[in-house]
Amino acid sequence: MSAVLLSHDARGVVTVTLNRPERRNAFDDALIRELDRIFAKLGRDPAVRVLVLTGAGQAFSAGADINWMRRVAGYSKRENRADAMGLARMLRRLDTLPKPTVARVNGATYAGAIGLVCACDIAVAAAEATFAISEVRLGLLPATIAPYVTAAVGVRQARRFNLSGEAFSADEALRIGLVHKVAALAQFDAAIEGTVAALLQGAPGAQGKAKRMIAAVAGKPVTPAVMGRTADAIAEARASPEGREGLAAFLEKRKPSFRT
């Protein structure tokens, strides 16, 4: 049985499903490598419009697999660093994917799996989902996920949940900005579909450039250099085939060619 399932629809929506329900979709080094390979391939595929990431069964992901943790406990510092860099690279790959990404948080989400949620552009949680950044309770650190968690929830909330390791609800995840929307189970799939449908209205090239622009300006003062970069970006967008088509379609009151 494959640890990762892929499904494609005619609109270019690809669902990536962590498929270890018997282990609550916990991941190990092999699964991390497979996800990194999949994200790289999907990022290069022009037919892919939106990526949805979810888990099979009742959990999104319980984080690191216990057998993997037992194995790395015997590693040297150098071996542990190399192993951790695999997760860091995979999260970076997801974070910078030039496509819109949606975390479909269908259930329990713990430890490193919260990094997967925060590395996605949009996160929608089932009302029953629970969360915990629990590494400190094992004497470990939520280190590789820290850039993504802190960017999502801010320093103050990151301090609380990284240090306490306490579990929290989907409603609390919404309050602190970890997820964007919470839906009851009966409306969960409709909430995901609504999010995907909204993303499919955008121009794919513009969406990829918008993601890069956000990364380029986040946390930076508005200097003349930043102002120049943003002005260059919109000038290039206006002159691009997508930009010309989008504006023409708007003026002509028709659907642009890039819209599904």
Image (cartoon, rainbow, N blue to C red):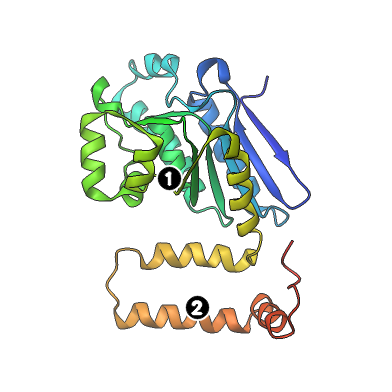
Q: Are dots 1 and 2 in contact, CB under 8 Å?
A: no
What is the crowding at mark 1: few (fewer than 14 residues within 10 Å), some, or many (at least 20)?
many
| Amino acid type assigned to the residue bearing label 2 in the image | Ala
The part of the image, by quadrant, that contains residue 164 is top left
Q: Secondary structure at mark 1?
A: loop
Q: Nearer the viewer, residue 250 or 40?
A: 250
Q: Is residue 59 visible?
A: yes
Q: Amino acid at mark 1?
A: Val
Question: Please, is residue 67 above or below residue 131 in the view?
Answer: above
> On the image, which quarter does residue 112 sit in?
top left
Mark 1–mark 2 Cα distance, whole angstroms, equals 29 Å
Q: Residue at x 74, y 84 (%)?
A: 252
Which dot marks residue 233?
2
Q: Is residue 61 above or below residue 182?
A: above
Q: Is residue 32 left or right of residue 239?
A: left
* Between discs 1 and 2, the one toward the N terminus: 1
The disc placed on residue 179 is 1
